[in-house]
Amino acid sequence: MADPRDREYARLLVDTCVGVQPGWQVLVLANPLGRPLVEEISRAVAERGAYELLQLSFGTTFLGEPAWIQHAPKELLETLAPLASRALEEADAIIAVVAPENTRDSAAVDSWRLQALQSAARPAMQRMFTYEVPWVGCQYPTPALAQDAGMATSDYAEFLYSAVLRDWDAERERMRRYADRFDEAEQVRIVGTGTDLTMSIAGRSMRVDAGGANIPGGEVFCSPVEDSAEGEITFAEFPAVLAGRDVTGVRLRFEGGKAVDASAEVNEAFLLETLDTDEGARYLGELGIGCNPGITRHTRNTLFDEKMDGTVHLALGNGIHDLGGTNVSAIHWDIVKDLRTGGRIELDGDVVQRDGSWLI
């Protein structure tokens, strides 16, 4: 049964996040379990006089089904299908609704195959990386996501809607204060369990995410200066999740911006293989600060977990080019660090957040 909040959710995606205009071709990528939200998106797109191009997938990646990715010849994986390229390159807007039956359905796929496909898709997705095309990714409450979060499906739905359906104008104003303080600074220092890491943000600006390319919003983020990261960070609190794999106890040591040493307690081989995807995979593409008060717990869902109030996240790989980032990589892997117990953020030596609470 559809939740009445899905119509409000759809309006957020179609109007606020993407701003669909008459005559646009809107590419909607979705999983079948997201049908209630997809139907509301379809209604909203139609009411705005735009075309909808719906593409359904049974897997957690919209670049191909896991069975095809696992068995396709290498040469096919290294070149995106021309029709798929055209859709990504010519769509006027892109909306992705992730509603998985199994969040681990890519775990049986060889990681090199996923990396090859991601690299092949990069040219067609370049408009998304540079925000030349409006796009948004979101999630719909399914039993699989609830199970990952350790919650009943009904409780998870309440959690998801609380994080998504907020007063984003008020949230934007609040987060703008934090972003402005970062924009005045040159150096960020993150201190916490197993962590003392510095990086430069000189000449870079923070973006406020209050209903943009990722829903839920609730973060401020930038691309740090590529060769500036120095020190160590340990992601001891939460697993790093990628391609259906949990990588726990990740530790990274940076010199001159590059992760020169890396280890993990579980799935270390996958971590190292991912870091060797390409030259840019060992550099930071993003520094993000979680600010969404509706997200108070880790759910093994990075799209939500990176927005958790009192956390920071670092993305290995591709930078945010319209914010001055220059790093290029086929990966963009967000990993979340909890600062709510014994952690702090410093800007040019001044403590601006302690134990997850802002001091500005």
Image: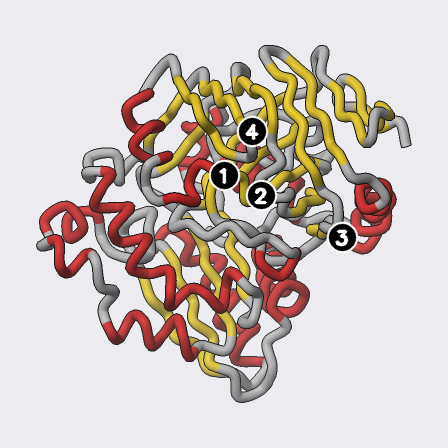
Measuring 38% from the left and 23% from the top, which residue is drawn there?
Answer: 247
Could you tell me if residue 158 is visible in this image? no
- CA–CA distance in space, label 3 to label 2: 31 Å
**Image disc number at residue 168:** 3
Q: Which amino acid is tagged 2?
A: Glu
Coordinates of residue 19 in the picture (x, y in percent): 64, 72
Q: Earlier in the sequence, mark 4 or mark 2?
A: 2
Q: Nearer the viewer, residue 300 or 38?
A: 300
Q: Earlier in the sequence, mark 3 or mark 2?
A: 3
User: Which mark lies nearer to you, 3 or 2?
Assistant: 2
Mark 3 is surrounded, within 10 Å at the Cα level, by few (under 14), some (14 to 19) or many (20 or more) other residues, namely some
The residue indicated by pointer 1 is 283
The residue indicated by pointer 2 is 226
Measuring 75% from the left and 45% from the top, which residue is drawn there?
Answer: 202
Coordinates of residue 41 in the picture (x, y in percent): 52, 67
The residue indicated by pointer 4 is 336
Measuring 13% from the left and 59% from the top, which residue is drawn there?
Answer: 75
Coordinates of residue 203 in the picture (x, y in percent): 75, 50
Q: Quadrant of residue 31?
A: bottom left
Q: Which amino acid is tagged 1?
A: Tyr
User: Which mark lies nearer to you, 3 or 4?
Assistant: 4
